[in-house]
Protein backbone atom coordinates (compact mmCIF):
# COMPACT_ATOMS: atom_id res chain seq x y z
CA UNK A 1 0.00 0.00 0.00
CA UNK A 2 1.24 3.47 -0.88
CA UNK A 3 0.44 6.85 0.65
CA UNK A 4 1.14 8.87 -2.43
CA UNK A 5 -1.61 10.69 -4.26
CA UNK A 6 -4.32 8.09 -3.72
CA UNK A 7 -7.27 9.90 -2.16
CA UNK A 8 -8.44 6.78 -0.36
CA UNK A 9 -5.84 5.11 1.85
CA UNK A 10 -7.80 1.87 2.00
CA UNK A 11 -5.25 -0.35 3.60
CA UNK A 12 -3.78 2.21 5.95
CA UNK A 13 -4.99 1.82 9.49
CA UNK A 14 -4.60 5.47 10.28
CA UNK A 15 -2.99 5.73 13.71
CA UNK A 16 -5.30 6.78 16.47
CA UNK A 17 -4.01 10.31 16.62
CA UNK A 18 -1.04 10.16 14.30
CA UNK A 19 1.61 11.29 16.79
CA UNK A 20 -0.66 13.93 18.26
CA UNK A 21 0.58 16.35 15.66
CA UNK A 22 -2.47 16.96 13.51
CA UNK A 23 -6.11 17.64 14.30
CA UNK A 24 -9.62 18.49 13.18
CA UNK A 25 -11.94 21.14 14.61
CA UNK A 26 -15.70 20.92 14.80
CA UNK A 27 -16.95 24.34 13.83
CA UNK A 28 -20.42 25.17 15.18
CA UNK A 29 -22.73 28.14 15.69
CA UNK A 30 -21.80 30.60 12.99
CA UNK A 31 -23.47 33.79 11.75
CA UNK A 32 -22.95 35.58 8.48
CA UNK A 33 -24.05 39.08 9.56
CA UNK A 34 -25.74 39.67 6.21
CA UNK A 35 -29.19 41.03 5.70
CA UNK A 36 -31.77 38.39 6.63
CA UNK A 37 -34.04 39.29 3.72
CA UNK A 38 -31.29 38.99 1.14
CA UNK A 39 -30.02 35.84 2.81
CA UNK A 40 -33.47 34.24 2.82
CA UNK A 41 -33.94 34.93 -0.86
CA UNK A 42 -30.52 33.52 -1.70
CA UNK A 43 -31.05 30.48 0.52
CA UNK A 44 -34.41 29.68 -1.05
CA UNK A 45 -32.57 29.38 -4.36
CA UNK A 46 -29.72 27.37 -2.84
CA UNK A 47 -32.16 25.10 -1.02
CA UNK A 48 -34.10 24.34 -4.16
CA UNK A 49 -30.90 23.54 -6.00
CA UNK A 50 -29.54 21.40 -3.16
CA UNK A 51 -32.73 19.39 -2.76
CA UNK A 52 -32.68 18.68 -6.47
CA UNK A 53 -29.16 17.29 -6.55
CA UNK A 54 -28.74 13.77 -7.81
CA UNK A 55 -26.58 12.87 -4.79
CA UNK A 56 -29.25 13.70 -2.22
CA UNK A 57 -31.02 10.66 -0.70
CA UNK A 58 -34.76 10.68 -1.33
CA UNK A 59 -35.45 10.39 2.39
CA UNK A 60 -33.57 13.58 3.29
CA UNK A 61 -35.45 16.89 3.56
CA UNK A 62 -33.25 19.94 4.08
CA UNK A 63 -36.16 22.24 4.95
CA UNK A 64 -35.38 22.09 8.67
CA UNK A 65 -31.74 22.91 8.03
CA UNK A 66 -32.54 25.99 5.97
CA UNK A 67 -35.15 27.13 8.47
CA UNK A 68 -32.52 27.00 11.22
CA UNK A 69 -30.03 28.77 8.95
CA UNK A 70 -32.46 31.64 8.39
CA UNK A 71 -33.31 31.95 12.08
CA UNK A 72 -29.65 32.14 13.06
CA UNK A 73 -28.99 34.83 10.48
CA UNK A 74 -32.00 36.80 11.62
CA UNK A 75 -31.68 36.46 15.39
CA UNK A 76 -28.08 35.75 16.32
CA UNK A 77 -26.03 38.53 17.95
CA UNK A 78 -22.31 38.04 18.48
CA UNK A 79 -21.53 38.48 22.20
CA UNK A 80 -17.76 38.68 21.83
CA UNK A 81 -15.28 40.06 19.35
CA UNK A 82 -14.81 37.61 16.48
CA UNK A 83 -13.96 37.66 12.82
CA UNK A 84 -16.85 37.55 10.40
CA UNK A 85 -18.10 34.12 9.37
CA UNK A 86 -18.71 33.22 5.75
CA UNK A 87 -21.34 30.94 4.24
CA UNK A 88 -18.53 28.45 3.52
CA UNK A 89 -17.66 28.41 7.24
CA UNK A 90 -21.27 27.53 8.02
CA UNK A 91 -21.31 24.69 5.52
CA UNK A 92 -18.09 23.34 7.05
CA UNK A 93 -19.73 23.54 10.48
CA UNK A 94 -22.79 21.67 9.23
CA UNK A 95 -20.67 18.88 7.74
CA UNK A 96 -18.61 18.62 10.92
CA UNK A 97 -21.78 18.42 13.01
CA UNK A 98 -23.20 15.68 10.79
CA UNK A 99 -20.00 13.65 11.11
CA UNK A 100 -19.86 14.21 14.86
CA UNK A 101 -23.40 12.81 15.14
CA UNK A 102 -21.99 9.38 14.22
CA UNK A 103 -20.25 9.35 17.64
CA UNK A 104 -17.16 7.67 16.23
CA UNK A 105 -13.90 9.24 17.46
CA UNK A 106 -12.07 8.23 14.28
CA UNK A 107 -14.55 9.72 11.79
CA UNK A 108 -13.91 13.43 11.31
CA UNK A 109 -14.25 16.29 8.84
CA UNK A 110 -11.12 18.24 7.90
CA UNK A 111 -11.61 21.90 6.88
CA UNK A 112 -8.81 23.35 4.71
CA UNK A 113 -6.17 24.02 7.40
CA UNK A 114 -6.71 20.69 9.14
CA UNK A 115 -6.71 18.80 5.82
CA UNK A 116 -3.35 20.37 4.95
CA UNK A 117 -1.94 19.43 8.37
CA UNK A 118 -3.17 15.86 8.09
CA UNK A 119 -1.70 15.35 4.62
CA UNK A 120 1.59 16.77 5.84
CA UNK A 121 1.64 14.30 8.73
CA UNK A 122 0.97 11.16 6.68
CA UNK A 123 3.76 12.22 4.34
CA UNK A 124 6.08 12.02 7.34
CA UNK A 125 6.59 15.63 8.47
CA UNK A 126 6.22 15.26 12.24
CA UNK A 127 6.41 17.94 14.87
CA UNK A 128 4.65 17.34 18.14
CA UNK A 129 4.99 15.32 21.33
CA UNK A 130 5.14 11.83 19.83
CA UNK A 131 2.33 9.81 21.33
CA UNK A 132 -0.71 7.95 20.06
CA UNK A 133 -4.12 8.54 21.62
CA UNK A 134 -7.54 6.96 21.50
CA UNK A 135 -10.89 7.07 23.27
CA UNK A 136 -11.56 4.40 25.90
CA UNK A 137 -14.83 4.38 27.83
CA UNK A 138 -15.38 7.94 26.62
CA UNK A 139 -12.07 9.18 28.04
CA UNK A 140 -9.09 10.52 26.08
CA UNK A 141 -6.42 7.87 26.66
CA UNK A 142 -2.76 7.48 25.70
CA UNK A 143 -2.20 4.35 23.63
CA UNK A 144 1.55 4.72 23.75
CA UNK A 145 4.35 7.30 23.77
CA UNK A 146 6.81 6.58 20.96
CA UNK A 147 10.32 5.48 21.83
CA UNK A 148 12.61 8.46 22.40
CA UNK A 149 9.78 10.95 21.90
CA UNK A 150 9.24 14.10 24.01
CA UNK A 151 6.17 12.42 25.53
CA UNK A 152 8.18 9.38 26.65
CA UNK A 153 11.01 11.55 28.00
CA UNK A 154 8.48 13.61 29.96
CA UNK A 155 7.12 10.46 31.64
CA UNK A 156 3.89 9.82 29.73
CA UNK A 157 2.79 6.16 30.02
CA UNK A 158 0.48 3.86 28.07
CA UNK A 159 -2.98 4.01 29.65
CA UNK A 160 -2.64 7.56 30.98
CA UNK A 161 -6.01 9.31 30.87
CA UNK A 162 -5.65 12.89 29.68
CA UNK A 163 -8.18 14.94 31.67
CA UNK A 164 -6.81 18.42 30.91
CA UNK A 165 -4.81 20.07 28.14
CA UNK A 166 -3.39 23.47 29.05
CA UNK A 167 -5.90 23.60 31.91
CA UNK A 168 -8.88 22.86 29.65
CA UNK A 169 -11.03 19.87 30.61
CA UNK A 170 -11.13 17.23 27.88
CA UNK A 171 -14.60 15.90 28.71
CA UNK A 172 -16.38 15.03 25.44
CA UNK A 173 -13.32 15.97 23.36
CA UNK A 174 -12.82 14.06 20.15
CA UNK A 175 -9.31 12.82 19.41
CA UNK A 176 -8.83 15.48 16.78
CA UNK A 177 -10.00 18.28 19.06
CA UNK A 178 -7.43 17.17 21.62
CA UNK A 179 -4.75 16.81 18.98
CA UNK A 180 -5.26 20.38 17.79
CA UNK A 181 -4.46 21.62 21.29
CA UNK A 182 -1.48 19.32 21.82
CA UNK A 183 0.28 19.63 18.46
CA UNK A 184 2.66 22.53 17.87
CA UNK A 185 6.03 23.73 16.71
CA UNK A 186 9.35 22.37 17.87
CA UNK A 187 10.57 24.04 21.06
CA UNK A 188 7.14 25.07 22.35
CA UNK A 189 5.64 23.54 25.50
CA UNK A 190 2.30 21.93 26.27
CA UNK A 191 0.99 20.92 29.71
CA UNK A 192 -1.13 17.80 30.15
CA UNK A 193 -2.92 16.66 33.29
CA UNK A 194 -3.23 12.89 33.41
CA UNK A 195 -4.76 10.27 35.67
CA UNK A 196 -2.68 7.10 36.04
CA UNK A 197 -3.70 3.72 37.39
CA UNK A 198 -2.24 3.09 40.82
CA UNK A 199 -1.66 6.79 41.56
CA UNK A 200 -4.30 8.67 43.57
CA UNK A 201 -3.80 12.26 42.45
CA UNK A 202 -3.70 13.63 38.89
CA UNK A 203 -0.22 14.26 37.45
CA UNK A 204 0.77 17.43 35.60
CA UNK A 205 3.20 16.73 32.77
CA UNK A 206 5.00 19.46 30.81
CA UNK A 207 6.21 18.36 27.35
CA UNK A 208 8.46 20.31 25.00
CA UNK A 209 7.47 19.61 21.41
CA UNK A 210 10.06 18.41 18.92
CA UNK A 211 10.53 16.78 15.51
CA UNK A 212 9.37 13.17 15.82
CA UNK A 213 11.56 10.40 14.46
CA UNK A 214 9.68 7.16 13.99
CA UNK A 215 11.55 4.11 15.33
CA UNK A 216 10.83 0.82 13.56
CA UNK A 217 12.67 -2.27 14.77
CA UNK A 218 15.36 -3.58 17.14
CA UNK A 219 16.77 -7.09 17.60
CA UNK A 220 18.36 -8.68 20.65
CA UNK A 221 20.15 -12.03 20.89
CA UNK A 222 20.08 -13.62 24.35
CA UNK A 223 22.81 -16.26 24.05
CA UNK A 224 22.39 -17.32 27.67
CA UNK A 225 18.75 -18.35 27.22
CA UNK A 226 18.96 -19.14 23.53
CA UNK A 227 16.29 -16.59 22.64
CA UNK A 228 16.07 -14.05 19.81
CA UNK A 229 13.87 -10.97 20.34
CA UNK A 230 12.43 -8.70 17.67
CA UNK A 231 11.10 -5.43 19.06
CA UNK A 232 8.75 -3.79 16.54
CA UNK A 233 7.79 -0.17 17.27
CA UNK A 234 5.48 0.53 14.34
CA UNK A 235 4.13 -0.90 11.09
CA UNK A 236 5.68 1.55 8.65
CA UNK A 237 6.10 1.26 4.90
CA UNK A 238 9.60 -0.14 5.52
CA UNK A 239 8.80 -2.44 8.43
CA UNK A 240 7.98 -5.52 6.31
CA UNK A 241 11.43 -5.57 4.69
CA UNK A 242 13.13 -4.76 8.01
CA UNK A 243 11.22 -7.61 9.63
CA UNK A 244 12.40 -9.96 6.88
CA UNK A 245 16.00 -8.94 7.59
CA UNK A 246 15.45 -9.52 11.30
CA UNK A 247 14.12 -13.02 10.61
CA UNK A 248 17.20 -13.72 8.52
CA UNK A 249 19.36 -12.73 11.50
CA UNK A 250 17.20 -14.98 13.71
CA UNK A 251 17.78 -17.95 11.42
CA UNK A 252 21.52 -17.24 11.25
CA UNK A 253 21.65 -17.11 15.06
CA UNK A 254 20.75 -20.85 15.08
CA UNK A 255 18.13 -20.23 17.76
CA UNK A 256 14.62 -21.73 17.67
CA UNK A 257 13.02 -19.51 20.30
CA UNK A 258 11.58 -16.18 19.18
CA UNK A 259 9.97 -13.33 21.11
CA UNK A 260 8.07 -10.69 19.13
CA UNK A 261 7.69 -7.60 21.30
CA UNK A 262 4.68 -5.54 20.21
CA UNK A 263 4.25 -3.60 23.44
CA UNK A 264 3.60 0.07 22.79
CA UNK A 265 3.20 -0.54 19.05
CA UNK A 266 0.20 1.53 17.86
CA UNK A 267 0.00 -0.10 14.40
CA UNK A 268 0.25 1.41 10.94
CA UNK A 269 0.17 -0.34 7.57
CA UNK A 270 -2.12 -3.34 7.25
CA UNK A 271 -0.06 -4.73 4.37
CA UNK A 272 2.98 -4.92 6.66
CA UNK A 273 1.07 -6.93 9.27
CA UNK A 274 -0.18 -9.37 6.62
CA UNK A 275 3.30 -9.76 5.15
CA UNK A 276 4.79 -10.48 8.58
CA UNK A 277 2.12 -13.05 9.41
CA UNK A 278 2.86 -14.77 6.09
CA UNK A 279 6.29 -15.89 7.36
CA UNK A 280 4.54 -18.16 9.86
CA UNK A 281 1.33 -19.21 8.07
CA UNK A 282 0.54 -21.46 5.07
CA UNK A 283 -0.81 -19.80 1.91
CA UNK A 284 -4.43 -18.73 1.92
CA UNK A 285 -4.91 -18.63 5.67
CA UNK A 286 -7.02 -15.66 6.79
CA UNK A 287 -4.97 -13.06 8.64
CA UNK A 288 -7.81 -10.59 9.17
CA UNK A 289 -11.32 -10.03 7.89
CA UNK A 290 -12.62 -6.61 6.91
CA UNK A 291 -16.27 -6.35 7.99
CA UNK A 292 -18.08 -3.52 6.16
CA UNK A 293 -21.35 -3.91 8.04
CA UNK A 294 -24.78 -5.15 7.01
CA UNK A 295 -25.53 -5.51 3.33
CA UNK A 296 -21.89 -5.62 2.24
CA UNK A 297 -19.74 -8.65 1.62
CA UNK A 298 -16.76 -8.89 3.98
CA UNK A 299 -13.29 -9.37 2.55
CA UNK A 300 -10.28 -11.18 3.97
CA UNK A 301 -6.57 -10.49 3.86
CA UNK A 302 -4.79 -13.82 3.47
CA UNK A 303 -1.32 -15.20 4.10
CA UNK A 304 1.12 -15.10 1.21
CA UNK A 305 2.41 -18.40 2.50
CA UNK A 306 6.12 -17.81 3.02
CA UNK A 307 5.71 -20.19 6.00
CA UNK A 308 9.42 -20.89 6.43
CA UNK A 309 9.31 -22.18 10.01
CA UNK A 310 8.53 -25.72 11.10
CA UNK A 311 7.00 -26.99 14.33
CA UNK A 312 10.34 -26.65 16.12
CA UNK A 313 9.81 -22.89 16.37
CA UNK A 314 8.78 -21.72 19.82
CA UNK A 315 7.32 -18.22 19.84
CA UNK A 316 5.84 -15.74 22.30
CA UNK A 317 4.36 -12.32 21.57
CA UNK A 318 4.40 -9.52 24.14
CA UNK A 319 1.37 -7.17 24.14
CA UNK A 320 0.02 -4.45 26.39
CA UNK A 321 -2.44 -1.57 26.40
CA UNK A 322 -0.24 0.23 23.88
CA UNK A 323 -0.54 -2.57 21.30
CA UNK A 324 -3.16 -1.48 18.79
CA UNK A 325 -4.45 -1.85 15.27
CA UNK A 326 -1.93 -3.69 13.06
CA UNK A 327 -0.23 -5.05 16.19
CA UNK A 328 -3.50 -6.66 17.22
CA UNK A 329 -4.04 -8.07 13.74
CA UNK A 330 -0.61 -9.77 13.68
CA UNK A 331 -0.75 -10.99 17.27
CA UNK A 332 -4.35 -12.16 16.96
CA UNK A 333 -3.69 -14.20 13.82
CA UNK A 334 -0.53 -15.91 15.12
CA UNK A 335 -2.21 -16.64 18.43
CA UNK A 336 -5.39 -18.12 16.97
CA UNK A 337 -3.45 -20.39 14.61
CA UNK A 338 -1.43 -21.65 17.56
CA UNK A 339 1.87 -20.18 16.35
CA UNK A 340 2.54 -18.07 19.45
CA UNK A 341 1.50 -17.50 23.04
CA UNK A 342 0.44 -13.98 24.05
CA UNK A 343 2.04 -12.60 27.20
CA UNK A 344 1.41 -9.29 28.96
CA UNK A 345 -1.80 -7.32 29.41
CA UNK A 346 -4.93 -6.72 27.32
CA UNK A 347 -4.32 -4.84 24.07
CA UNK A 348 -5.86 -1.45 23.32
CA UNK A 349 -8.71 -2.61 21.06
CA UNK A 350 -8.43 -0.39 17.98
CA UNK A 351 -9.66 -2.62 15.17
CA UNK A 352 -11.14 -0.28 12.62
CA UNK A 353 -9.99 1.10 9.30
CA UNK A 354 -10.41 4.62 8.00
CA UNK A 355 -10.43 5.99 4.48
CA UNK A 356 -9.19 9.50 3.77
CA UNK A 357 -11.47 10.99 1.12
CA UNK A 358 -10.98 14.38 -0.51
CA UNK A 359 -14.27 16.28 -0.82
CA UNK A 360 -12.69 18.98 -2.98
CA UNK A 361 -9.28 20.62 -3.33
CA UNK A 362 -9.48 22.02 0.22
CA UNK A 363 -11.48 19.70 2.47
CA UNK A 364 -11.62 16.02 3.30
CA UNK A 365 -13.26 13.33 5.41
CA UNK A 366 -11.60 10.59 7.42
CA UNK A 367 -14.29 7.92 7.67
CA UNK A 368 -14.41 4.61 9.50
CA UNK A 369 -15.44 2.17 6.78
CA UNK A 370 -14.91 -1.23 8.38
CA UNK A 371 -13.98 -3.12 11.51
CA UNK A 372 -11.31 -5.78 11.75
CA UNK A 373 -12.08 -9.35 12.80
CA UNK A 374 -9.50 -11.96 13.81
CA UNK A 375 -9.46 -15.27 11.88
CA UNK A 376 -11.92 -16.68 14.44
CA UNK A 377 -14.28 -13.74 13.90
CA UNK A 378 -13.46 -11.79 17.06
CA UNK A 379 -13.97 -8.04 16.86
CA UNK A 380 -10.72 -6.36 17.88
CA UNK A 381 -12.42 -3.02 18.56
CA UNK A 382 -14.97 -4.50 20.93
CA UNK A 383 -12.73 -6.81 22.92
CA UNK A 384 -9.05 -6.23 22.24
CA UNK A 385 -6.74 -9.23 22.69
CA UNK A 386 -6.59 -11.07 26.01
CA UNK A 387 -3.13 -12.56 26.67
CA UNK A 388 -2.75 -16.28 27.29
CA UNK A 389 -0.60 -15.36 30.28
CA UNK A 390 -1.42 -12.06 32.00
CA UNK A 391 1.55 -10.30 33.56
CA UNK A 392 1.41 -6.71 34.79
CA UNK A 393 4.32 -4.33 35.26
CA UNK A 394 4.11 -2.34 38.48
CA UNK A 395 5.64 1.08 39.19
CA UNK A 396 8.06 -0.77 41.47
CA UNK A 397 9.14 -2.96 38.55
CA UNK A 398 9.80 0.12 36.44
CA UNK A 399 11.78 1.82 39.18
CA UNK A 400 13.89 -1.29 39.66
CA UNK A 401 14.41 -1.83 35.93
CA UNK A 402 12.56 -5.16 35.98
CA UNK A 403 10.55 -6.55 33.05
CA UNK A 404 8.37 -9.39 34.40
CA UNK A 405 6.55 -9.71 31.07
CA UNK A 406 9.77 -10.45 29.20
CA UNK A 407 10.86 -12.75 32.04
CA UNK A 408 7.62 -14.74 31.75
CA UNK A 409 7.96 -15.03 27.95
CA UNK A 410 11.51 -16.37 28.37
CA UNK A 411 10.28 -18.81 31.00
CA UNK A 412 7.54 -20.11 28.68
CA UNK A 413 9.93 -20.63 25.79
CA UNK A 414 12.55 -22.39 27.93
Image (tube, grey):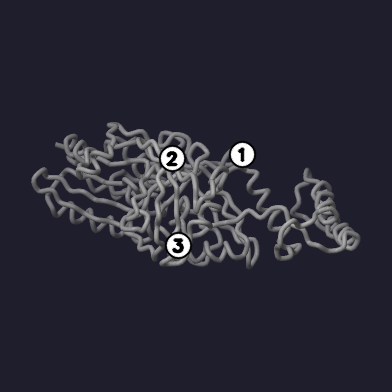
Q: Tag 1, which secondary structure? A: loop
Task: Tell me the residue at 50%/53% (across/down).
Answer: 166
Residue 307 placement (x, y as % from top left): 27, 47
Examine the rendered structure and indicate whether residue 86 appears above or below residue 317: below
- Of mark 1 and mark 3, the one earlier in the sequence is 3
Callout 2–callout 1 Cβ contact below 8 Å: no
Residue in front for this viewpoint, 244 or 235: 235
Task: Please name the residue that numbered disc 3 is placed on.
Answer: 2
**Side of 243 relative to 70 (left or right):** left
Q: Position of residue 158 (x, y in %)?
A: 37, 45
Residue where numbered disc 1 is placed? 295
Of mark 3 and mark 2, the one earlier in the sequence is 3
Earlier in the chain: of badge 2 and badge 1, it is 1
* Location of the N terminus (image quadrant): bottom left
Q: For the residue labelled by badge 2, is the local secondary structure a helix, a strand or a loop? A: loop
* Mark 2 crowd level (few <14, some 14–19, many ≥20, 10 Å Cα): many
Residue position marked by numbered label 2 in the rendering: 349
Local SS, label 3: loop
Amino acid sequence: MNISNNPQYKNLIISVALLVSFGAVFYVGFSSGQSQMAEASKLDSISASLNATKDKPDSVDFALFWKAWNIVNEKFVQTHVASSTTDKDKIYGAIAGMVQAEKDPYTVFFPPAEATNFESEIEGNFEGVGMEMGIKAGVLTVITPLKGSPAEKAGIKSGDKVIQIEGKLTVDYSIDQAVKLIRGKKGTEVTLTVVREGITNPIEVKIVRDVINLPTIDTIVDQKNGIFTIKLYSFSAQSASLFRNALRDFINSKQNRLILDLRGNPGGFLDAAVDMASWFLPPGKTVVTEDYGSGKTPTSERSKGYNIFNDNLKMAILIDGGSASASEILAGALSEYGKAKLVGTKSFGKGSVQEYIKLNNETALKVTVARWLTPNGKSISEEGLIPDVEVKITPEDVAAGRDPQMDKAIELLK
